[in-house]
Amino acid sequence: MTTPDHTPGSRDPGGAEGDPAATLEVRGSGALATEQPAGAAIAPSNPGPAAPAPVPATGGAGQGGAVDGEEPPPSRRKRRPLRTSLIVLVAITVAAAAGLAATGTLGGKEDDKPEASQGSSATAKVQRTSLTDTQTVDGNLSYGDASTVLGQSSGGGTNPGEGGGSGIVTWVPKAGDTIKRGGDVYRVNQQKTPLLYGNIPFYRTLQSGDSGSDVKILEQNLKALGYDGFVADSTYNDNTAAAVKEWQDDLNREETGTVKLGDAVVAPGARKVSDVKAEVGAPPSGAVLSWTATERVISVDLDAQYEDLVKKGTKAQVKLPDGTSVEATVTEVGSPSNAADEQSGDSGSGDSGSGDSDKAPTLPVELKVKDQKGLGNYQAASVDVTLKSESRKNVLAVPVSALVAKDGGGYALEVVKSSAPNGVEYVPVKLGMFADSMVEVSGAGISEGTVVGVPK
């Protein structure tokens, strides 16, 4: 029987001819080859055109290559899948081990550090910067809470609802209308009931000889509307009465020089009508309309744990549904409350240990937005409110992804050094604040401009 020549680069099997065992050989390039038993053809690592299979010397061999009278040798074709599987399995195992070593998943001595080429695909520099920690909470954009305007006929009583006169509603605004100082809130018998700005409603008839904060509110509004000849000093005197008569004439009212209940409606500022309740032709009793402020505000039910993040004047960023942002300022901070407090007076099952009663306490916070145009056309919307929690100035920081977990705890940075054996040195660091995908770091050998590896 003729034995085919060995392919260049193959090794002598060193065993009995026909031994089916094959030994794995690792080449210098990292490729895997196999030792073949004597008589087997070995494919070169870069095969060219397929060579014809060796032909036996005697012509009596069958298709399997057996000689007459001899048992045909085991088929080589059936063993190739096993060899290929072994090669793939070993290659996968080597790659997996390299990956685990690079990520620090495998245990080992602290001195066993992965090379820069195994773990890092990019570098970054240690920066000297300022970091600001923030807390983002849910908020609601709206015109604020609506309040109700109660109608009163101009009568002269001393208590609300005691108007001694009578009349019917002859005009009301429309929902969506904006009413400013001096504008009509509603009309009774075609007499105008104007809006005045202030924080105390008129609760009595005002006349000469009176004094107090309500008198000052009246005088300040008369000044703002263009009436003069008096001093806004909280004292109602004859000069004040003269200005009131002029004002009453412009309102198509009787010129009495005194201001009765129902002669004006006092509110903190301009109002936006949200709903009209009174009907023209009906008596001016009960709810006439409801209104809100004309500027949109942000309201937040803030978890009590974040109470220290807000106070009057605190700045915040508000992100709108379209992705744009505006700056807001905290104007009101209420008192903490929880669902159990709110439900304490409600009737029901009385199961105080379930449902919303377990919610953490919250406190109401209101923020105003100076740039109303920046809010676009949103009338009401859910928004994200970002509050500043803590700031650190002039600190050293790196991307969070540059941190390398140390075996046994703690973190290090992969500092690039040409003098190091593998081109990098692992330097332990102490961590500080995390903010905006950066982390504050400190440690011996870490300074501004230090180049560090950023793992994949």
Image (cartoon, rainbow, N blue to C red):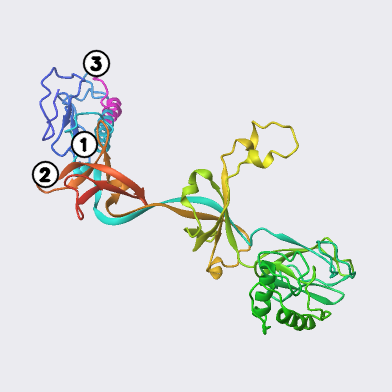
Q: Are marks 2 and 3 in contact (CB under 8 Å)?
A: no
Q: Residues within 10 Å of mark 3 (few under 14, many from 20)?
A: few
Q: Is residue 245 left or right of residue 29?
A: right
* Region of the chain picked out in magenta, as a range: 71-85
- Between circles 2 and 1, the one closer to the viewer is 2
Mark 3: secondary structure: loop
* Residue under label 3: 71
Mark closer to the chain start, 3 or 1: 1
Report if residue 3 is visible in the image. Answer: yes
Residue displayed at 73% across by 73% down? 209
What x and y, as percent, mark residue 266? 71, 68
Mark closer to the chain start, 2 or 3: 3
Mark closer to the chain start, 2 or 1: 1
Residue displayed at 84% across by 70% down? 154
* Residue under label 1: 52
Q: Is residue 177 above or below residue 15?
A: below
Mark 2: secondary structure: loop
Q: Residues within 10 Å of mark 1 (few under 14, many from 20)?
A: few
Mark 1: secondary structure: loop
Between 208 and 440, the residue placed more toward the observer is: 208
Q: Label 1 is placed on what type of residue?
A: Pro
Query: Residue 203 falls in which quadrant of the image?
Result: bottom right
* Residue under label 2: 420
Between 109 and 241, the residue placed more toward the observer is: 241
Q: Measure how far apart labels 2 and 1 are at the Cα level.
A: 54 Å
| Residue 45 part of the magenta segment | no
- Between circles 2 and 3, the one closer to the viewer is 2
| Residue 73 part of the magenta segment | yes
Report if residue 43 is visible in the image. Answer: no
Identify the image quadrant of the N terminus.
Answer: top left
